[in-house]
Amino acid sequence: MTDRRDLAALLHPLVQSLIAAEQPVLAAHGISMWGYAVLGALDDQAVRTQTALADAIGADKTRIIGTLDKLQEAGLISRVPDPRDRRARLLSISAAGSEVCRSVRAAILAHEERLLARLSADERASFLSAVQTLSRLSREEIVKGG
Amino acid sequence: MTDRRDLAALLHPLVQSLIAAEQPVLAAHGISMWGYAVLGALDDQAVRTQTALADAIGADKTRIIGTLDKLQEAGLISRVPDPRDRRARLLSISAAGSEVCRSVRAAILAHEERLLARLSADERASFLSAVQTLSRLSREEIVKGG
DNA sequence: TATTGTTATACTCTATAACTATA
DNA sequence: TATAGTTATAGAGTATAACAATA
């Protein structure tokens, strides 16, 4: 191992910059970062409760309410009481929401491709593979050092 | 390019978990995350003003004052008015501070090594190389897509 | 007048607790 | 009594503005 700064110190500023780079794309589509996170989660599969959705994107249930209000108002998601248990809200993405999600993701990935062009083909492939492997670890696994 | 989530979405939770994993180590040495950031910056080189130090670690100048107070009180840094311009504060790390920095870094790197063991040797090397390459980019370069 | 550090203030984000409705 | 969602409140972290000292 060559001497290096810790991963958090290296990655934290990078992530902050990546988030900043996403803002213009999100603003152009009229959605927030949390709105994009919600669309991304619902694009995979519908969800039965807002609490489950919040967990899926690492947010508090109280934190996504305003986001859901806006997405619903914009017609990007559907949010209806479950007829079998009217306490719960059935959440799903609309065709328009799916289109926004795809469009935003394409723009962000295109932007990221320009950054990844700084890496060699080998580095690039291994980097993406490693990021996906590590991002599959749970917080507990990482904290414990699994 | 295989379809994937965007880098910020993949890396943000990972970084949060890495930061959480650092807390016990930092607590054991009685310093905060910002304290560790300051020690890391001063370990490379002394700095003439607090504003320059804040910039170096991506913080606001008003944000590190309490941190500097604590580090100074603990004898981990030296902080004296520049005799040639008494507005500025000459900042440098002490022997004790350097020792704490080294000790904390060693513990964090050892922890991270356990995580990186999940990657193949090839992936691991390319991942670290890529992270260091990307982390050298300025925020402007990343936002613009350089 | 400009700059460095500091303090005071306000703002944003987030979490906690209290409330409503359903079960 | 317990759960889902919502609202209200409070807390942490951060940025902005005002201030004192020095140049």
Image: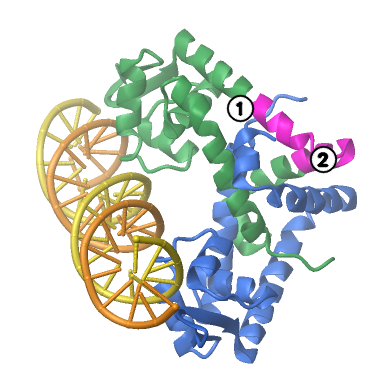
Chain colours: A green, B blue, C yellow, D orange
Task: Give the amino acid at mark 1.
Answer: Ile
Q: Position of residue A72 (x, y in %)?
A: 33, 18
Q: Position of residue B83 (x, y in %)?
A: 51, 88
Q: Position of residue A102 (x, y in %)?
A: 57, 17
Residue B109 is labelled as none
Label 2 sits on a secondary structure element that is loop
A52 displayed left or right of A133: left
Q: Pick whichever, A6 or B112, lies toward us.
A: A6
Q: Pick whichever, A56 or A113, lies toward us.
A: A113
Residue at image position (42%, 25%) is A31
Chain letter, disc 2 residue: A
Q: Which residues are magenta?
A: A108-129
Q: State the CA–CA distance, disc 1 to disc 2.
A: 18 Å
Chain letter, disc 1 residue: A
Residue A108 is labelled as 1
Determine contact: label 1, label 2, CB under 8 Å.
no
Q: Pick whichever, B69 or A140, lies toward us.
A: B69
Q: Quadrant of the C terminus of chain A?
A: bottom right
Q: Quadrant of the N terminus of chain A?
A: bottom right
Question: Is residue A41 in view from this perspective?
Answer: no
B112 displayed left or right of B23: right
Residue at image position (70%, 40%) is A132
- Considering only vertical position in the picture, is A36 above or below D13? above
Q: Main secondary structure of the magenta part?
A: helix
User: Is residue A118 found inside the magenta-colored segment of the image?
Assistant: yes
Crowd band around label 2 with a 10 angstrom C-alpha radius: few (<14), some (14–19), many (20+): some
Task: Give the amino acid at mark 2.
Answer: Leu
Question: Is residue B56 in view from this perspective?
Answer: yes
To the question of a shared chain for discs 1 and 2, the answer is yes
Query: Which residue is labeled 2 in the image?
Result: A119
Crowd band around label 1 with a 10 angstrom C-alpha radius: few (<14), some (14–19), many (20+): many
